[in-house]
Image: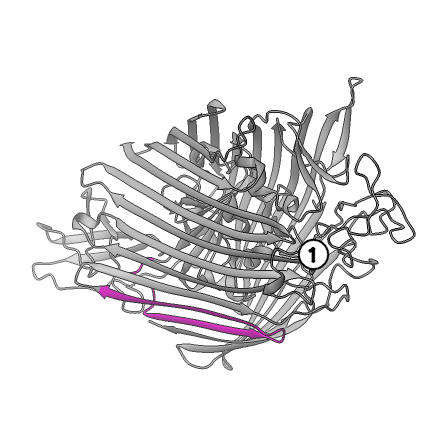
């Protein structure tokens, strides 16, 4: 037990007798017919350290309480994402990074999108200076290469990949698990570059009430609250609400455009957990999300929505999600999981309307079979149906001109085979087959090997393939700003990747201090990659399958430490090389660096605690190396390569009582914005509808006295947040 909370589902073993029992929801267990004697008791349960104790059984057996401690090392954390089965991180053949609510508290932000800025090798990338759309980069690969799931279900994709990470109540998050590298062998398309799995709390183990309210000197206000309650005797419910409001336009760089998009959003989440016989799983969760955001000229108001007099980008998003898990009432461990989502977007980018609807239906049946003590298999059947419709040419019948929504059915089957060859070696084999209605048969195998050198050192080697089917109009929002036109050169084939990853991790302990170290090398080769071409024609974004290949390779290092239980360190470094190699027509491959991709990056989070005063200080930050930036013309005076830049934050937290704490601090201590050392960020912000631009017969802008750099309006020159220094103040409450 921990804090008087009974541990349901703990495995209690007496290995000498080869007997084991499972504790009930009250934490009780009983062994029957035990003869008097001494026995070694082994107790294990997910999320707590293993427990061993010798007990003496006499003729008069009395009740005894055993207290288990929660895991404190990230190596002991329980993960499910790598193999779809719960296991300790150090036992997983797939490297999984785990980030807990304590990590999120070090730099409080109103969304998961921003919270990931301090994860090594992961970068939230803004794609538009006006509407602040964004995606998540992993190891230099753009957002569409990353699958984002909630409780393992793929609900954040396509349209939602832009806005879906906003509005997830952080108070309800149990942990975030990240897998870097292709995970298509288990999760299918969109997991070609990595996977971020947001795992919500179990209602029966969550606190009774949580509350987090924060405001900043920019007048940003956020509220995140959660509460659990029972419905009858067999249903536990966890309810969460997330609210964010920012309604004060600012223009510090004096370009007459908002520095940060104004936002007003609300998200409501409810998760139900049903108590069943034999501890079988049954849960149902739903979320509704609504957001109204706009950015543009400072004079803009709703009366100008969709007009060409004052420029503004106004996006209204309505979204619902439903997630369910049900363990079948059979002897074998079989689980049916499903998710359904609906996403409606009502948008205007200047005078260009963009109305879209997307519905995704996903179902998955898995059979987790223990074949022997050291051999287990996971068999899965999956099916996904995507419906997408908008008012663009993406869903138009080119022959008749009529509307033709995109409908894709994607069934799949996967098999995972795990062998514990001995105490040191663990082998995992996997294969997935998907049938795409357009691209037909797709195979994605993978292999993983874990070698435990000893109890503290582990080597992992992983190799596999991935695939991705591209949806241009739901991934490329730069096409909607009116600045560029999307051109598709050919029929696009699905992208394929081949990946190898080698990882070494170790734990070093000295007295009251401990360090966890891990280092990884990766190499990913892409075939048929689809990369947007911004440079051939400044008025277009040109798409086609790459005539050549591209690679992503690099090294990443993480250090997690605790010194005397007062100073905690979490820091990381990533060095990467991401490039494409195209045929030049003469048999040679020409190298091109990928735009908006840094050569190196680093993150850190330092925490020092003063126990007697109940005070904690957090210093967090990130730093990024140079990256190539998209220019409009050869005369464009803006920097073609970004400088080294860093966002740093400091926070002071005061514990008021066992349930309440206050926090305050400064974000962006260096007051750094991309407008520094640049003549401007948004090209021709004074003429966003290009009314004064002169073009040649090919549609290229001409240099004129009024437009000496031959530019058109373009807000896509963005690589970092455009929000300067600001103070913040907040209050947290947790009532168990």
- In the rendered image, residue 209 lying in the magenta stretch gets the answer yes
Residue 659: x and y, percent?
A: 39, 77
Relative depth, front residue between 247 and 603: 247
> In terms of image quadrants, where is residue 153?
top left
Residue 206: x and y, percent?
A: 33, 63
Residue at image position (35%, 50%) is: 322
The answer to whether residue 421 is above or below residue 34 is above
Can residue 240 be seen in the rendering of this structure? yes
Considering the whole magenta stretch, tell me its main secondary structure: strand
Can residue 205 be seen in the rendering of this structure? no
- At numbered mark 1, what does the secondary structure look like: helix, strand or loop? strand
In the displayed structure image, the side of residue 316 where residue 539 appears, left or right: right
Residue at image position (67%, 30%) is: 550
Relative depth, front residue between 664 and 6: 664
Q: How is the image coloured?
A: one colour
Q: Residue furthest right?
A: 705
In the displayed structure image, the side of residue 614 where residue 418 appears, left or right: left
Residue 42: x and y, percent?
A: 27, 51
- Local crowd size for mark 1, using a 10 Å CA cut-off: few (<14), some (14–19), many (≥20): some
Q: Which range of residues does the magenta coloring cover? A: 202-230
What residue is pinned by disc 1?
Answer: 623
Residue at image position (11%, 53%) is: 36
Name the image quarter holding the N terminus.
bottom left
């Amino acid at each position: 037990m921990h804090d008087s909370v009974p541990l349901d589902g703990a495995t209690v073993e007496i290995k000498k007798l080869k007997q084991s029992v499972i504790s009930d929801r009250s934490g009780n267990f009983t062994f029957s017919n035990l003869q008097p004697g001494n026995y070694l008791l082994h107790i294990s349960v997910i999320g707590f350290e293993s427990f061993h104790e010798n007990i003496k059984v006499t003729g008069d057996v009395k009740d005894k309480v055993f207290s288990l401690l929660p895991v404190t090392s990230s190596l002991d954390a329980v993960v499910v994402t790598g193999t779809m089965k719960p296991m300790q991180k150090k036992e997983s053949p797939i490297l999984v990074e785990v980030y807990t609510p304590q990590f999120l508290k070090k730099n409080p932000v109103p969304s998961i999108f921003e919270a990931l800025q301090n994860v090594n090798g992961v970068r939230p990338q803004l794609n538009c200076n006006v509407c602040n759309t964004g995606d998540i980069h992993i190891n230099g690969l753009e957002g569409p290469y990353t699958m984002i799931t909630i409780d393992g279900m793929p609900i954040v994709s396509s349209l939602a990949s832009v806005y879906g990470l906003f509005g997830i109540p952080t108070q309800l998050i149990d942990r975030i698990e990240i897998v870097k590298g292709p995970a298509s062998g288990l999760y299918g398309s969109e997991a070609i570059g990595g996977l971020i799995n947001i795992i919500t709390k179990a209602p029966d183990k969550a606190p009774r009430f949580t509350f987090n309210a924060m405001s900043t000197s920019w007048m940003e206000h956020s509220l995140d609250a959660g509460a659990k309650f029972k419905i009858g005797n067999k249903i536990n419910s966890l309810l969460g609400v997330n609210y964010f409001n920012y309604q004060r336009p600012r223009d510090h760089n004096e370009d007459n455009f908002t520095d940060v998009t104004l936002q007003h959003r609300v998200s409501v989440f409810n998760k139900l957990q049903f108590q069943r016989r034999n501890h079988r799983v049954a849960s149902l969760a739903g979320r509704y999300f609504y957001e109204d955001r706009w950015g543009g000229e400072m004079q803009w108001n709703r009366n100008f929505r969709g007009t060409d007099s004052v420029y503004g980008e106004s996006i209204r998003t309505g979204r619902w999600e439903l997630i369910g898990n049900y363990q079948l009432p059979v002897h074998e461990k079989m689980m049916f999981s499903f998710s359904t989502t609906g996403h409606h977007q009502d948008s205007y980018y200047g005078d260009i309307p963009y109305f879209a609807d997307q519905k995704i239906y996903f179902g998955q049946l898995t059979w987790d079979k223990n074949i022997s003590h050291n051999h287990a298999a996971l068999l899965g059947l999956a099916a996904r149906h995507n419906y997408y419709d908008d008012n663009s040419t993406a869903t138009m019948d080119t022959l008749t001109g009529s509307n033709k929504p995109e409908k894709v059915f994607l069934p799949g089957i996967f098999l995972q085979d795990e062998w514990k060859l001995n105490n040191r070696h663990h082998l995992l084999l996997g294969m997935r087959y998907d049938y795409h209605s357009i691209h037909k048969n797709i195979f994605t195998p993978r292999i993983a090997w874990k070698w435990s050198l000893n109890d503290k050192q582990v080597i992992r080697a992983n190799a596999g393939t991935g695939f991705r089917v591209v949806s241009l109009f739901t991934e490329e929002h730069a096409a909607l700003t009116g600045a560029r036109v999307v051109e598709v050169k050919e029929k696009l084939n699905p992208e394929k990747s081949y990946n190898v990853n080698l990882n070494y991790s170790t734990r070093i302990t000295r007295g009251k201090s401990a360090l966890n170290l891990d280092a990884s090398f990766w190499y990913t080769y892409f075939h048929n990659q689809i990369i947007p071409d911004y440079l051939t024609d400044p008025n277009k974004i040109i798409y086609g399958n790459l005539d050549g290949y591209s690679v992503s390779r690099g090294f990443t290092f993480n250090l997690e430490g605790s010194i005397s239980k007062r100073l905690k360190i979490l820091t990381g470094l990533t060095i990467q090389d991401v490039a494409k190699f195209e045929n030049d027509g003469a048999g040679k491959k020409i190298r091109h660096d990928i735009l908006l991709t840094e050569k190196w990056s680093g993150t850190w989070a330092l925490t020092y605690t003063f126990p007697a005063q109940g005070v904690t200080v957090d210093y967090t930050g990130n730093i990024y190396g140079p990256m190539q930036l998209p220019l409009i013309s050869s005369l464009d005076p803006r920097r073609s390569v970004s400088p080294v830049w860093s966002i740093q934050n400091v926070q002071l937290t005061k514990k008021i009582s066992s349930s309440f704490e206050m926090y305050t601090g400064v974000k962006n201590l260096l007051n750094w914005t991309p407008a520094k050392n640049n003549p401007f960020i948004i090209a021709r912000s004074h003429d966003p509808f290009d009314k004064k631009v002169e073009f040649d017969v090919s549609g290229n802008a001409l240099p004129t006295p009024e437009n000496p750099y031959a530019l058109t309006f373009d807000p896509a020159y963005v690589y970092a947040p455009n929000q300067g220094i600001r103070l913040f103040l907040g209050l947290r409450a947790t009532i168990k």
